[in-house]
Image (cartoon, grey):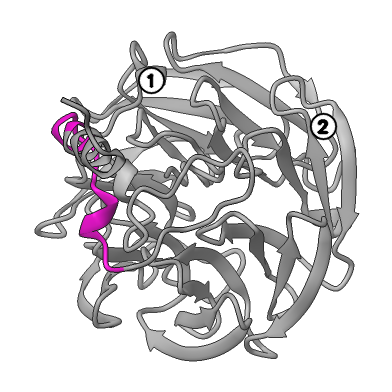
């Protein structure tokens, strides 16, 4: 019997779903045409569909279950076993470690040592299968790092120079750079659903910069708040809205990425800072650092707000018991815990995503962009694990 092309496609789709995939026909949104080399968007209604609990890539097989914490002022990394909440290792790295960034291929964790105020910046690789560091690579001012959606280049965020450096994702050899001169304090970013552009926050300019990744040029700038201090940024599951935490505004701005226009604001808490999606892609966790100061005091008015993507409303806000300073981190692989650094309190918080209950683990001096590993997803776009 000869099968029609439509029949064959139906069988293939059924097999894909049976193997754990998500049928595109189940989505109401049209298919997404991505940039060349970028993995396809399986569900246009939820670009995080392949980073849900259980979607573990073969690339992370054998990786130790650990939380890696860079401590800015003690210049080291603490390693926590998330099952016991105990520190099981620590090792020195470069000067001013800011974030721990999973590579696009999920094989390496890079410690971004930007050597704040100095010229000896570096990246320290960590093997997630052993939890041990390798030889550092000297790189100019790596405050943060991302990857092009096709995985062919790393994007080192050279904050002090208002510049993006495009490097080989493995050797970190410099390939090209892009000046983003008007973006003072360029630091965090997220990417459009099709991979054609990225939006970066300008911490000391109160604005955003939109970057055309295809033509490698600055599209333009958008002022959010003249007295603002935008921090982390995260795109909604349908790719239509970018959420931008503003530490001075105590909440999250909403921005239409395509038109590059501000469309709304959601009040969350004092010092809105880090943004992380729930594993099912329905909620956004906002880490409110508890202070509007760059160097805040201990036991501030820290909290975590939970925003519902569907309604764009705050469902609940969980205070840190006794005060605290939740900053950067990520969600556990199963989605049951949100791990955040306590920036001014020298601790790490493990927060129950059902109840908001908090466990605190002492670490080094001024912990910053910790990462939880392994995480679900096919590839990493950078930061502390923006996986898709």
State yes or no: residue 135 in magenta.
Answer: no
Whether residue 127 sits left or right of residue 65 in the image: it is right
Find numbered disc 1 in the image and state the secondary structure of the residue it sits on. Answer: helix
Find numbered disc 2 in the image and state the secondary structure of the residue it sits on. Answer: loop
Q: Is residue 267 above or below residue 54?
A: below
Specify the farthest residue to the left: 355
Measure the C-alpha gap from mark 1 to mark 2. 26 Å
Q: Which label is found at residue 332?
A: none
For image coordinates 45% across by 27% down, the residue present is 78
The picture quadrant where one finds residue 12 is top left
Depth check: 52 or 277 in front?
Answer: 52
Residue 235 point in image, percent of width and height: 46, 65
Q: Is residue 252 above or below residue 180?
A: below
Neighbor class of circle 1 (other Cα within 10 Å; few <14, some 14-19, many 20+) is: many
Residue 263 visible in the displayed image:
yes
State yes or no: residue 23 in magenta.
Answer: yes
Find the magenta span and give its range: 15-28
For image coordinates 69% across by 81% down, the residue present is 206
Residue 169 point in image, percent of width and height: 70, 28
Which residue is tagged 1?
A: 60
Residue 34 point in image, percent of width and height: 56, 52
Depth check: 379 or 347 in front?
Answer: 379
């Amino acid at each position: 019997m000869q099968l029609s092309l439509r029949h064959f496609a139906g069988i293939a789709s059924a097999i894909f779903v049976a193997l754990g995939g998500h049928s595109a026909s189940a989505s109401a949104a049209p298919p997404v045409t991505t940039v060349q080399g970028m993995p396809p968007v399986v569900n246009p209604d939820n670009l995080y569909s392949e980073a849900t609990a259980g979607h573990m890539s073969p690339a992370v097989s054998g990786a130790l279950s650990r939380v890696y914490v860079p401590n800015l002022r003690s210049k080291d990394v603490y390693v926590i076993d998330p099952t016991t909440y105990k520190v099981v290792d620590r090792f020195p790295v470069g000067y001013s470690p800011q974030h721990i960034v999973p590579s696009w291929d999920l094989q390496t964790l890079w410690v971004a040592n930007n050597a704040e105020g100095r010229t000896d910046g570096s990246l320290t690789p960590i093997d997630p299968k052993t939890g041990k560091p390798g030889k550092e690579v000297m790189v100019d001012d790596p405050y943060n790092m991302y990857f092009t959606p096709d995985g062919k280049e790393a994007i080192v965020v050279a904050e002090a120079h208002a510049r993006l450096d495009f490097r080989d994702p493995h050797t970190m050899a410099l390939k090209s750079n892009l000046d983003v001169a008007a973006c003072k304090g360029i630091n965090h970013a997220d990417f459009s659903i099709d991979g054609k552009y990225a939006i970066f926050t300008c911490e000391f300019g109160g604005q955003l910069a939109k970057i055309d990744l295809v033509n490698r040029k600055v599209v333009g700038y958008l002022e959010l708040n003249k007295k603002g201090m935008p921090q982390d940024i995260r795109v909604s599951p349908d790719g239509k809205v970018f959420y931008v935490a503003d530490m001075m505004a105590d909440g999250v701005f909403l921005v239409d990425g395509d038109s590059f226009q501000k469309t709304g604001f959601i009040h969350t808490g004092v010092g809105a800072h880090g943004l992380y999606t729930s594993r099912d892609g329905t909620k956004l966790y906002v880490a409110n650092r508890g202070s509007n100061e760059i160097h805040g005091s201990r036991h501030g008015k820290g909290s975590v707000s939970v925003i519902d993507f569907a309604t764009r409303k705050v469902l609940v806000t969980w205070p840190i018991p006794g005060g605290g300073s939740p900053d950067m981190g990520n969600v556990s692989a199963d989605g049951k815990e949100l791990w955040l650094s306590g920036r001014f309190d020298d601790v790490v918080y493990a927060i129950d995503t059902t109840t908001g209950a908090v466990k605190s683990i002492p670490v080094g001096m001024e912990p910053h962009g910790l990462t939880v590993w392994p995480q679900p997803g096919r590839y990493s776009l950078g930061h502390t694990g923006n996986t898709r």
